[in-house]
Each structure stands twice: as C-alpha cells, then as structure tokens.
Amino acid sequence: MDEALERPIVRGIAGPGLLAKTVVYRWQDHLPVYRQESIHARDGLELARSTICGWHQQLADLVERVVEAMLRDAFTQPYLCVDATGILVQAKEQCRKAHFWVMVAPERHVIYRYSHKHDSAAVDQLLAGYKGHLVADAHSVYDHLYKQGDVIEVGCWAHGRRYFHKALGSDPARSEHGLALIRALPRRTPSPDGHPQKTRGRPPPEVAPHRRRLFRLV
C-alpha cells in the first residue's frame, strides 16, 4: 500500500495549493470566507465557511515558527515601526473592542499581532526583548519603554503633521507655518559626491550626519 501523502493539516483532505489559495483570497485579496463559499459552490465544490475558518486556525499554528523567526530578524534591524488599530470582535452579548498591532521592519517584514487591550502590557508582549529605535505615535502606552533607555523614541512626522492640519481652522497663521516647515524637511539626503540619494534602508549612523546638516537649513 502506498504511503498517505503528507498534508499541511493532519488528517486533512486539503492540499497546500487549496489552502494557500483560501489564505491569499482572505488576507491579501480581502475576500471574506462567505464569498469564498459561494465562489467554490458555483464551481461545484461545497466548501463551508466554517471549514475554511478551521483550516486557517490550524494553519496559524503551523506557521507560528515562521512568524517567530521573522520577529527575531525584525528585532535586529536598525529600527521598527509600530501602530495599532481598534476593531470590533463578535461576542454573545455584544461586540467587544480589541486591537490589531502592526510591526514593520522596513524592506523586510510586516508582522501582525492581536491583543484584547491597548495598554502597556500589550506593548510589552509585542516588543519583549527589543532594543533599538522605535517609530510610533505619541500614545502613553509606549512611554515606559523610553524611560528604561533600551528603546529610543522616534517621533512620527505623519502624526505630528496631523495636529498642525487640525489647527488650521483655529490658528491658521502658526499652523501654516508649521506645515511649511514640515514640507521643507528633506525627503532625500545627498551622497558624499553631492548627488541625491534615498535614505530608505540606510542605517541611521549613515543618514544622521546628512540630515543634521540639512535640518539646520530649515
């Protein structure tokens, strides 16, 4: 008797191609499982949304080691970008609020995590063991990291600009001045030979001297 084919899900009938297809549909193409259910039914495949959800839950456990490896590599990068967004989660009585976190190691990884609360404990769980520069908003949930000294705060210009823009109606003169200064901040820094050079992906020690020199002009 031939040996049974190894499947990503133990005792599952779905092969890696179908499993990958449902994952890409749901998370990359933003196609909800109920729509996938109807699409497969139209093609003659009765595939319940509950089955797809069950597959994805088991696949999450399967790839957790890959995600952990991504996280370890992300922690070695010159800086990380972190943000959170609130979501509503279905519950028996009424929907409750929870949060998705996104951690970006530019040019390398985008990692998502989930927490019930948006608090310092969630930040500690997300960034446990990290030492380096952190690009984040000015929310107080990050403040304790900076006091310890292992994590260096990097302010987010997108968040900073937002409040100058909000103040246009109440204090247009100073708001417009602030926005003009932000627009003047260089998006590129020159290389030693004077030619423009993008800063993305370059380590902070290489970028900092050029930016300090150009920022004095602003």
Image (tube, rainbow, N blue to C red):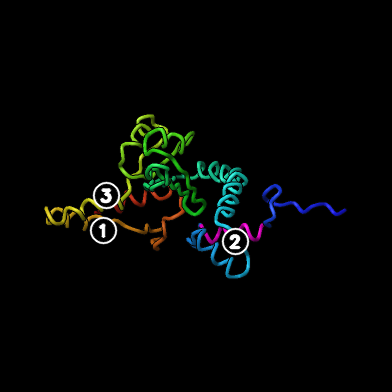
Span colored in magenta = 16-26
Q: Earlier in the sequence, mark 2 or mark 1?
A: 2
Quadrant of the rendered image containing residue 116: top left
Q: What residue type is disc 2 on?
A: Lys
* Front disc: 2 or 3: 2
Q: For the residue labelled by badge 1, is the local secondary structure a helix, a strand or a loop?
A: helix
From the viewer's perspective, tell me whether residue 47 is left or right of residue 116.
Answer: right
Q: For the residue labelled by badge 2, is the local secondary structure a helix, a strand or a loop?
A: helix
Q: Residue at x 61, y 43 (%)?
A: 65
- Is 201 in front, or is 114? 114
Q: Which part of the image, by quadrant, shows the C terminus?
A: bottom left
From the viewer's perspective, tell me whether residue 187 is left or right of residue 170.
Answer: right
Q: Residue furthest top?
A: 148
Q: Are marks 2 and 1 in contact (CB under 8 Å)?
A: no
Q: Earlier in the sequence, mark 1 or mark 3?
A: 3
Q: Position of residue 142 (x, y in %)?
A: 36, 37
Q: Residue at x 37, y 39 (%)?
A: 118
Q: Are marks 1 and 3 in contact (CB under 8 Å)?
A: no
Q: Residue at x 22, y 55 (%)?
A: 181
Q: Mark 1 = which residue?
A: 184
Q: What residue type is disc 1 on?
A: Ala
Q: Position of residue 194 (x, y in %)?
A: 38, 61
Give neighbour class at mark 2: few <14, some 14-19, many 20+ (Cα, 10 Å).
few
Q: What residue type is disc 3 on?
A: Gly
Residue 21's disc number: 2
Instruction: Relative to 64, say whether 173 is above or below.
Output: below
